[in-house]
Amino acid sequence: MEKDIEQILYSAEAIQERVVELGQTITADFKDKNPLLIGVLKGSFVFMADLVRALDMPCQLEFMGVSSYGNKSETTGAVKITRDLECDIEGRHVIVIEDILDSGLTLSYLMKYLQNRRPASIEICTLLDKPERRQVEVHPRYKGFAIPDAFVVGYGLDFAESYRNLPYIGVLKPSVYA
Ligand code: PRP
């Protein structure tokens, strides 16, 4: 896998340091709120696993599956739920956990979908943000790193379902996907 990586953007250590900071901030904000963290599969699974261990308070976890219709690079903006919640979120303090915020279409759809279920509050925590790519407005309260518009993999993020298990976040060589 390493031979396909052009550059390491964030080492495992750098990610861990930032995740711990995020965990401390979220703990301070939600200490007495027993938040429900909703991880968006599949990309968020590694971040979610590390983030929850950096939270020093009671909380619960859920996962949802979403996918965009059609080719990712030419997204139509239509999103479908492939795995729904298994619990009622009415009155709960919800934090949606994402690995990456790109066009914003996924989170924009998901936020409306979840708002309709009447949570007490709802916030977004994304590890990565690619602001240059935004097509619709989304406002994450918690953000790990803002990154340039490069094809990144690792720490949960994939190319064609591979590289999710890299412990760092790296830029994929264009020769791999071109
Ligand atoms: C990624 C990521 C977000 C979405 C962000 O998921 O996890 O859900 O894309 O892109 P957007 O802001 O342009 O909507 P992906 O569809 O690659 O699926 P995966 O999590 O299973 O890898």
Image (cartoon, grey):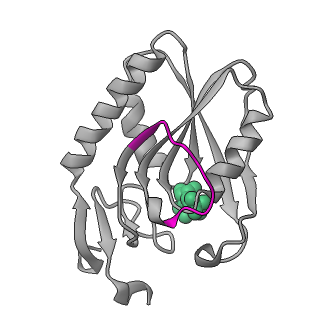
Query: Quadrant of the rendered structure where residue 162 is?
Result: bottom left
Is 134 covered by the magenta stretch? yes
Is 83 colored magenta in this rendering?
A: no
Q: Which quarter of the frame holds ligand 1?
A: bottom right
Q: Residue at x 38, y 72 (%)?
A: 150
* Horizontal arrangement in the rendering, residue 103 relative to residue 156 (left or right): right
Give the residue furthest to the right.
116
Closest to the observer: 101 or 2? 101
Residue at 73% x, 54% y: name it.
82
Q: Which residues are magenta?
A: 133-143
Q: Give the vertical position of 98 relative to 17 (above or below).
A: below
**x and y, in percent, of residue 107 in the image:** 62, 50
Residue 115 vs 80, above or below: the answer is above
With 101 as the anchor, is 108 left or right in this view?
right
Q: How many marks?
A: 0
Query: If the image is split into quadrants, where does the N terminus sit?
Result: bottom left
Of all residues, the one furthest to the top in this rendering is: 32
Q: Quadrant of residue 63?
A: top right
160 or 70: nearer the viewer:
70
Residue 95's x, y, as percent?
Answer: 56, 32
Q: Nearer the viewer, residue 97 or 141?
A: 141
Quarter of the C terminus within the rendering: bottom left
Q: Is residue 4 visible?
A: yes
Give the residue displayed 32% in from the left and 82% down from the top: 173
Left or right for 106, reference 153: right
User: In this orientation, does residue 54 appear?
Assistant: no
Q: Residue at x 74, y 42 (%)?
A: 112
Residue 39, image x, y percentages: 56, 42
Side (left or right) of 148 relative to 158: left
Q: Main secondary structure of the magenta part?
A: loop
Residue 47, given in percent of the width and then of the height, sits at: 41, 44
